[in-house]
Amino acid sequence: MINMDVFRGFLEAIHHLPEMAQPDHLTDPERVKIAKKVMINKIDRGLALDLEACVSCGYCTEACHFYQSTHDPKYSPSRKLDLLRKVHARETSAFAPVKRLFTPDITIDDLKEWQELVYDSCTECGRCSMICPMGVNTARGVNVMREALFEAGLAPLELQAVAQEQAGRGTVFGVGSNELLAAVKQIEEQGTAIPVDLRQADVMLITSVIDILLYQDAFVGSAKILNHLGVKWSLRTAGFEGANFGLLSGSEDLQKLASKRLIDEALQIGAKIVLVPECGHAYPAMRWDARLDDGEPLPFKVMAVSEYVGQQIEKGNLKLTPGDPSHRVTYHDACKLARHGGVMTEPRSALKALGVDFVDTAPTAEQNWCCGGGAGAFLINRAEGLRHQAWQIKREQVEATGAETVAVSCGSCRLNFMAGAEKDKWPVKIESVVAMVAKQLDESLAKTL
Ligand code: SF4
Ligand code: SF4
């Protein structure tokens, strides 16, 4: 059962984030200079190709939930890259000296305008790229814009505040190792063993501030499943936070630092698998972007916990009690897991194994709609109305299945669903895939080490 007071307290805390951001002292010309420098440095051959390949056909607009729900042309995916396109034309394109003559330079007003376009109204979901005939990777360009704006001190204050906290104190929303240990103690008192700081373990479980504070069912569910499987696993107090506000805000340095904290712990205990919690962006941060200090690939496997659980079910390693065949359940694909990460069959295998009446949404899997709350958008206060509009598409999609429950495998999506449900008095239950599986573990068949 989710504690709605904690949920509302979390929403309230988000409202106060801007007050916590430490201001910088950059002048406007300095901000423009810094932002341009980042953009120029980041425009490699692939991005240049993306910027030049767009034929303005407009197909991508139909794929974007922010455009679809508002019909405001400023939210067209292609337009979100216009500023980057301008910098490319003037600075890095083949005919830059000529193009500079008739392409105006970017200004501080441009940068401020683009803040809304690349943070509030783009969840980097990648859906527009699925439909683009030229294969333009808008999400990547948007991420570069975020890096430019962050370095210029123009990221939304909410994201700046949390990024500053994670970079400085190493905590997120005030949750550090002491708070983790307090949560673990409480969970153990309720009967679930959580091994902490083992010297050697085959599996290292990462968690996140959201799961510690709010979605403990997902955290406890992961622990129960690992215990049931009898694997040797551990949490690490020096590296447990999966949320990466470097990736969300656009701070490349923080992204690397936050990943390094996890990598160092996994290396220290010789982990063969690092399990990322139900957190969409934590998955690509570790699975695709993280590297060793020397740039080499990670020597262990990174898996999303719902992917791992689904695989264990597919292999017959998890024994479940029968579910209710009249309970209709559908699944929301978190964009970073499904479209970006290919994790689509495993969470479905897990849900189908519960013996419920599983029904997919239409469209589904890699074509599924984004819920509108990912990539840090959920934390941006001024984006609340826009997010809620975009979520209506998802709401209608779920309602069309007739499901009583929508299962999710991302805490951010779950937050966005819950915020939408609270606002609209939506009766559909919003549950974690892992928590649902954990509820049906047949403990009489659990393995022990
Ligand atoms: S990545 Fe997603 S949110 Fe961003 S422009 Fe494309 S469809 Fe819209
Ligand atoms: S679908 Fe692709 S080519 Fe067409 S406008 Fe969008 S980004 Fe440009």
Image (cartoon, rainbow, N blue to C red):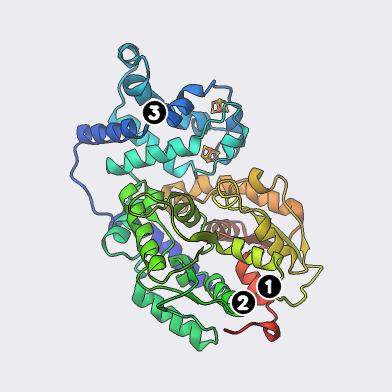
Query: Whereabouts is ligand 2, in terms of quadrant?
Result: top right
Q: Tell me the SS state at disc 2.
A: helix
Q: Residue under circle 3? A: 83
Residue 286 screen position, x and y as percent: 45, 55
Residue type at mark 2: give it. Answer: Leu
Name above or below for residue 397 compared with residue 427. above
Q: Are marks 1 and 2 in contact (CB under 8 Å)?
A: yes
Instruction: Give the residue type at disc 3.
Output: Leu
Q: Nearer the viewer, residue 160 or 132?
A: 132
Residue 251 at x, y = what percent? 33, 48
Inter-mark Cα distance, 1 to 2: 7 Å
The secondary structure type at the circle numbered 1 is loop
Q: Is residue 71 above or below residue 437?
A: above
Instruction: Report which quarter residue 42 is drawn in.
Output: top left
* 1 and 3 marks in contact (CB < 8 Å): no
Sequence-wise, the earlier of marks 3 and 2 is 3
Foreground mark, 1 or 3, reads 1
The residue identified by callout 1 is 317
Determine the CA span between mark 1 and mark 3.
Answer: 51 Å
Q: Considering only order in the chain, which callout, 3 or 1, is on the residue closer to the N terminus?
A: 3
For marks 1 and 2, the one nearer the N-term is 2
Label 3 beta carbon less than 8 Å to ligand 1: no
Q: Is residue 134 left or right of residue 52?
A: right
Question: Which circle marks residue 229 in the picture?
Answer: 2
Please name the residue shown 45% across and 59% down the image.
299
